[in-house]
Amino acid sequence: MSDQTFMNYVAQKYSLALADIGYQFNHTLAPGKSSHRFRSHMIHYAGVSHREANWFNRPSKIAKMRSDHFILSKRSLSNLASSHPFLVRMIDHVL
């Protein structure tokens, strides 16, 4: 996380012009927004480690990557997930 803090500092220090390129190019699994991840070109899997997953009662980022890989590797599931984010929310609660 220190790289993001440094980049923010440099951007503000030098008044760099920034542009929001949208979630499609660097989608994070932020709470409440992760159900739209299958509409993105790139998914950034920040989150809890495998060891921390039990502590926080959440899936680890590796577990999330595995389940997303399964969905993305099946064209019909991938199309369904990108078209219906509410189904992804339901699946995420089960997994």
Image (cartoon, helix red, strand yellow):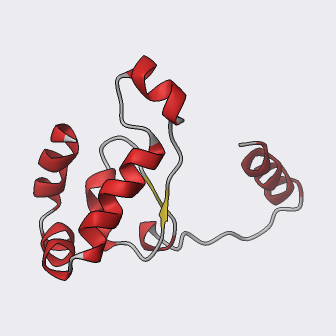
Where in the figure is residue 88, as x and y percent of width and height?
18, 55
Write the residue at 20% across / 81% down: 75
Write the residue at 50% across / 34% down: 50
Q: Quadrant of the N terminus?
A: top right
Where in the figure is residue 65, as x and y percent of width and height?
41, 56
1, 68: nearer the viewer: 68
Where in the figure is residue 22, as x and y percent of width and height?
46, 70
Number of numbered discs overlaid on the protein picture: 0
On the question of residue 40 being in view, the answer is: yes
56, 62: nearer the viewer: 62
Q: Quadrant of the C terminus?
A: top left
Where in the figure is residue 25, as x and y percent of width and height?
50, 73
Outermost residue to the top: 55
Please determine whether, in this image, residue 38 is positioned above or below residue 47. Answer: below
Write the residue at 13% across / 79% down: 76
Horizontally, residue 38 falls left or right of residue 29, namely left
Please determine whether, in this image, residue 48 is positioned above or below residue 41. Answer: above
* Among the 4 quarters of the image, the one containing residue 53: top left
Please determine whether, in this image, residue 73 is positioned above or below residue 13. Answer: below
Write the residue at 28% across / 61% down: 36
* Among the 4 quarters of the image, the one containing residue 74: bottom left
On the question of residue 37 being in view, the answer is: no
